Amino acid sequence: MEKGLLYPVINNYRSDEKMDGLWNFKFDPAYEGESKGWQNGFNDGVKMPVPASFNDFFTDKDAREYTGDFWYSKTFFVPEYFEGRDVQIRFGAATHRAVVYVNGQEIRSHEGGFLPFTAEVTNAVKFGEENIVSVKINNELHRDALPAGDTATLKNGKKMAKPFFDFYNYSGLNRSVHLLTVPKNGIYDYSTSYEVGDAEATVHYSIQADSGDDVKVSLINEDDQIVATGEGNTGDLKVDHPNLWNVRDAYLYTIKFELMNDGKIVDEYADQIGLRTIEIKGHEILVNHKSVYLRGFGRHEDSIYAGRGFDLNVERRDMNLMKWIGANSFRSSHYPYDEQVYKFADREGILVIDEVPAVGFKMAAASFLGGLNQSFFDGDWTHELYKKHLDQIIDMIKRDKNHPSVLAWSLFNEPDTSNESAVPYFEKLFAATADLDPEKRPRTFTLNEDDTYETSKCLKFPDFYLLNRYPGWYHKWGYEISDGEAGLRAELDEWQKSDIDKPIVFSEYGADTEPGLHKLPSIMWSEEYQIELLEMFDRVFDSYDFIRGEQPWNLADFQTVEGNMRVNGNKKGIFTRDRQPKAAAFYLKKRWTKLPLNYKAGK
């Protein structure tokens, strides 16, 4: 658990220099890096871009599939004028566990490949000189880790990742690395929550700092005018005639905190926020007390060459594609994304279901994922897993809680809930996370095809339901798709007859589609069949008032492990991996641009 996860800013009290670029890189299959002194730096490795996954830069398969320890190293200069401030190195992500050394001194370790962490290096650096940072990273998969899987050893002695999840185990320094200075005993966290009306809005705020005898707070509108002020570590800001943050119609205020000591400013932090509320009432999702129907996607941070490495260019393209097609939401499947993604969503008015990397918690997964026929939560690994799971939920909420785009927290993707052994784990986790978010946003998780209204033992926990369903593809496919529709309707009829009154969002459905493959009449993998499957689901969605969202899988094609069910990755994208539209994109654009935001309101 990190003390604070504020995104870096530059002002009179804080500095931020990116350490991105080419780092020295080495594999360590014999786990001998420390004994050979690599913590002191090295120059005989290859030059590796940061941020990026290492895998797809190589042309040999052993390197691409490498599993085990590997190292990054880089020299960096620390100016003399940094003295007197805390010096930190902030890693946006290191997949999946890391140990950080500066000038040969071990600083800290961290586990969790999709969230940032900070190494406090003030006492390890030399001011006015070059310094060396080395990072040992390990990308092995384990059942007591997030995401879950196994690590196998082949007969030739090489290790191989065996994920229990259907996306590639891209590894490395996938996000930016920052060299920061911050004031000693400064601000390290803040929180906001809201009450909104047409004539007035209230921003409830609190800040956490290590020292200071007073805090001054200002709220500034997009015209750079101060519209409210306050004092103290906690308080309320009243805004007359507020501009609310709405879906696909975003308005952002700047909130600025000034930490005072003896009447002087000793630290300052500013961020952009949006004034809005989120509620679940009956089977409605409400933003600013108004019904919202979700349309959008499951996504992946995945692109050619850089793998899971964050690329601002790819994100700009993805946001424009979502706007073009009429989407208003996405799920950060199956892990928290780079913080800049949420900043994009804040500006564009896109809602985000923010998901922790609790994926692979189902041993009875499809055989091509290496699953076993037993309940995941019967395993003796769940005690250690729970601690890591909770730790990453805490950090995800701490990092993302002030983004107006975040609609909900997804605490699992497709866990095994059809066995009673899951219930104690869920009870403990939902109780432990109930008060983490000052806004009390809804919490949820996705239910896969084995976990239905009739079979799941954990339906009491989520505030709304996310259903992943694949009739027409993984079962009842091709000419049998009419039976797939009948089966889906039969399941939804059970939900409708129940006493459950919560929204359902379809968070995954779709068909693998080879771009450019056309067939009349259609066959599976053709672009025509992808549209026919979407049409089938849309008929179903329009038939049930409690269905309040549709997010087909996936925005774009993405890389997976090799397998006889995959031809170079998952091809369920509405767009290709290089972000060009398949025929289905034009079909969805026609549907989504006609659907009102409040579709089914009052029903």
Image (cartoon, rainbow, N blue to C red):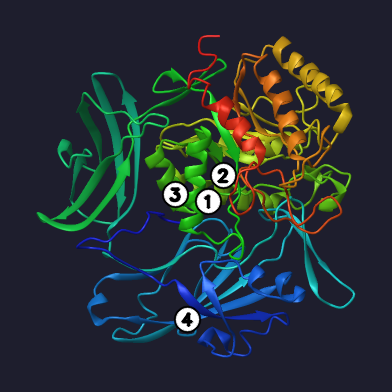
Question: Mark 1–mark 2 contact, CB under 8 Å?
Answer: yes
Badge 3 element: helix
Q: Residues within 10 Å of mark 2 (few under 14, many from 20)?
A: many
Question: Mark 3–mark 4 contact, CB under 8 Å?
Answer: no
Label located before the other in sequence (3 or 1)? 1
Label located before the other in sequence (3 or 4)? 4
Q: CA distance from mark 3 to mark 1?
A: 11 Å
Q: CA distance from mark 3 to mark 4?
A: 27 Å
Question: Mark 3–mark 2 contact, CB under 8 Å?
Answer: no
Name the kind of residue labelled 1 in the image.
Tyr
Task: Indicate which label's residue lies in the foreground, 3 or 1.
Answer: 1
The residue labelled by disc 4 is 74
The residue labelled by disc 2 is 332
Q: Residues within 10 Å of mark 3 (few under 14, many from 20)?
A: many
Name the kind of residue labelled 3 in the image.
Arg
Task: Indicate which label's residue lies in the foreground, 3 or 4.
Answer: 4
